[in-house]
Image (cartoon, grey):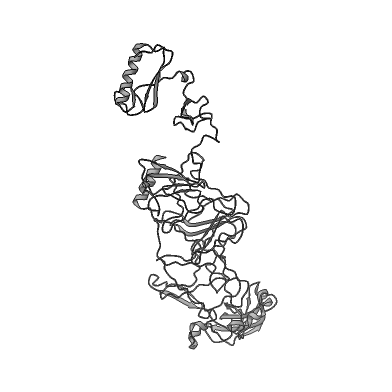
């Protein structure tokens, strides 16, 4: 095939130009083109370079070089609307592509991953099925992981195993946050009246904190406002509330406001389920532990118990074990501390401290005051009443029987009188005149009036004894009427009249009309055939109900996951 003109040779099929051969092409190249053209016709118009079986219009096995791309570096080759291939000279600024090896000179108005219509961006791995979806960015901007749609109000949602709508059973921990040093694993903040971090569960734990160090805290609450409350907790579907500003914590419940347990398993270990202190940094605790420990420093109170409704107790203590103590008070510091202090201010039958013995035990005691520390000096008492002391029963002393102290008690009883009397006694020997002068204590007249009573008893022989001279201003009286050398036993009773009785004359009253809520009631109603409810000091016994202690423990799978997390940190 020859061409002697300056026109090119044109190859055409079905009225279509396939390529042109210009005049400057040599004969050997023309032969090559003819061969290619023959192959093109054989392969249904497909052209192959480096292959004898092209499967596209142009099928090249190997690299392609274009002089138009020389010297411009790594660039994208793109087709314009006419189908012409062009190389980008400005990176991605005029490109719709996104390089997986990194991008530079980014124009956020042109270069981004996303959609231009109201559609979500979906991420999948390991396949194109519905369960291969891993994350979705919703058209509105919410992000949801392992689910096709978030709940209303969620901005970022992650769905773990077992949750309705989760695409895959990925694991029990939907979100884990890790941090070192003084940072935060997970931080939540709400600048309004909402919640920074919210935890919710139907049967498990809403928020769980675990501390593995001896100085670590599983949970720590802090309010930086001077009038704020660090922790506000409520149960029984009650609204959370607090009484005063500035509380460390406020708890509210329809049955129990706060339940705390300590696990003291040895009498040699000290601790407390609840420990509260007022301006005191020293931790005090008894061996064996305590349910509640309250410590005061300065002018406050360690524990305050108050009752305002229904006649119930401000503080109630129950000792139900063999050697248990319902309420135990001890004082071992300061000049005049108080182990237990009871005080009443109003009410006709108010009682500061009550001891009730309703036991059938032979040695049970309602209130016990015991002095056990030596030396038992004169001003120490097991029980002391700074005022009147009364009893509807007898007032005995009881000691271990001197003749059989291991098996018996010995009791002696106080004498009763319708007068407030002091009793004095002694023995004298009559002088040569058959007389004797008795000298009473120098304080005698300061605590007694002049309403005296005398009793004289001769010892060894009868005598006509008499009081020759009554008590004088110097506290003396004279006995006479007997033989010289006669021994005389004497007693004197005097009506007490110290400042206490001078200023409280009603204390001498013997028959007193009942007043207030004592009218119609009895001190011991059963003695008169009346029910116990008719007692002046009657108080219905507490009906104690036991509640089974509930415990929450991590199951083996949860513990395994926790250990795994700790090992990965």
Q: Could you tell me residue 486's position as x and y percent?
A: 56, 81
Which residue in the rendered view is the most extreme toward the right? 473
| Closer to the camera in the image, 105 or 519 | 105
Figure check: 23 above or below 456: above
Foreground residue among 396 and 136: 136
Residue 147 image position (x, y, % from top left): 42, 49
Left or right of residue 214: residue 56: left
Please name the residue shown 54% across and 87% down the image.
462
Q: Is there any visible trace of residue 483 in the rendered image? A: no
| Quadrant into which the C terminus falls | top left
User: Which residue sits at x=52%, y=34%?
Assistant: 111
Q: Tell me: residue 200, above or below residue 58.
A: below
Q: Position of residue 38 (x, y in %)?
A: 31, 21
Would you say 516 lies left or right of 323 here?
right
Residue 371 screen position, x and y as percent: 50, 65
Judging depth in this view, the residue of 389 and 359 nearest the camera is 359
Residue 342 vs 421, above or below: the answer is above
- Give the quarter of the figure containing the N terminus: top left
Q: Quadrant of residue 537?
A: bottom right
| Residue 416 visible in the current orientation | yes
């Amino acid at each position: 095939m020859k061409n002697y003109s300056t026109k090119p040779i044109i190859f055409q099929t079905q009225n279509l130009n396939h390529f042109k051969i210009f005049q400057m092409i040599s004969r050997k190249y023309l032969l090559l083109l003819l061969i290619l053209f023959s192959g093109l016709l054989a392969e249904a118009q497909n052209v192959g370079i480096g292959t004898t079986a092209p499967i596209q219009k142009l099928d090249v096995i190997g690299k392609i070089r274009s002089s138009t791309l020389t010297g411009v570096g790594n660039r994208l080759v793109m087709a314009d609307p006419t189908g012409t291939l062009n190389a980008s000279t400005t990176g991605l600024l005029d490109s719709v592509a996104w390089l997986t090896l990194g991008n530079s000179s980014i124009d956020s108005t042109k270069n981004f991953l996303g959609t231009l219509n109201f559609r979500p961006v979906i991420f999948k791995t390991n396949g194109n099925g519905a369960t291969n979806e891993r994350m979705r960015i919703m058209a509105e901007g919410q992000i949801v992981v392992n689910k096709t749609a978030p709940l209303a109000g969620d901005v970022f949602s992650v769905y773990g195993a077992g949750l309705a709508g989760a695409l895959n059973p990925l694991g029990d921990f939907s979100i884990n946050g890790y941090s070192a040093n003084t940072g935060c694993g997970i931080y939540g903040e709400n600048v309004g009246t909402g919640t920074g971090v919210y935890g919710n569960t139907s049967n498990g734990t809403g928020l769980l904190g675990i501390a593995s160090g001896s100085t670590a805290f599983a949970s720590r609450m802090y309010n930086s406002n001077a009038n704020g409350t660090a922790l506000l907790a409520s149960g029984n579907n009650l609204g959370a509330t607090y009484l005063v500003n500035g509380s460390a914590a406020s708890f509210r419940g329809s049955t129990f406001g706060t339940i705390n347990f300590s696990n003291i398993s040895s009498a040699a270990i000290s601790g407390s389920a609840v420990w509260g202190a007022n301006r005191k940094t020293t931790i005090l605790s008894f061996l064996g532990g305590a349910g509640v420990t309250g410590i005061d420093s300065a002018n406050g109170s360690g524990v305050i118990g108050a009752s305002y409704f229904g006649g119930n107790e401000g503080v109630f203590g129950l000792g139900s074990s063999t050697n248990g103590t319902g309420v135990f008070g001890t004082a071992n510091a300061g000049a005049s501390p108080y182990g237990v202090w009871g005080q009443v201010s109003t009410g006709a039958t108010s009682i500061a401290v009550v001891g009730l013995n309703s036991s059938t035990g032979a040695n049970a005691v309602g209130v016990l005051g015991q002095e056990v520390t030596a030396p038992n000096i004169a001003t120490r008492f097991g029980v002391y009443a700074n005022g009147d002391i009364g009893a509807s029963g007898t007032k005995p002393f009881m000691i271990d029987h001197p003749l059989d102290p291991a098996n018996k008690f010995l009791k002696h009883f106080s004498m009763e009188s319708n007068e407030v009397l002091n009793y004095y006694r002694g023995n004298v020997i009559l002088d040569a005149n058959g007389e004797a002068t008795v000298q009473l204590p120098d304080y005698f007249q300061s605590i007694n009036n002049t309403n005296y009573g005398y009793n004289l008893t001769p010892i060894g022989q009868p005598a006509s004894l008499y009081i020759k001279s009554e008590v004088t201003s110097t506290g003396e009286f004279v006995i006479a009427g007997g033989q010289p050398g006669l021994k005389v036993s004497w007693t004197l009773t005097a009506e007490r009249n110290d400042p206490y009785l001078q200023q409280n004359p009603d204390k001498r009253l013997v028959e007193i009309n009942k007043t207030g809520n004592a009218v119609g009631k009895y001190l011991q109603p059963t003695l008169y055939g009346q029910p116990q409810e008719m007692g002046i000091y009657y108080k219905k016994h507490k009906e104690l109900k036991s509640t089974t202690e509930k415990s929450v423990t991590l199951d083996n799978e949860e513990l395994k996951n926790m250990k795994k997390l700790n090992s990965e940190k």
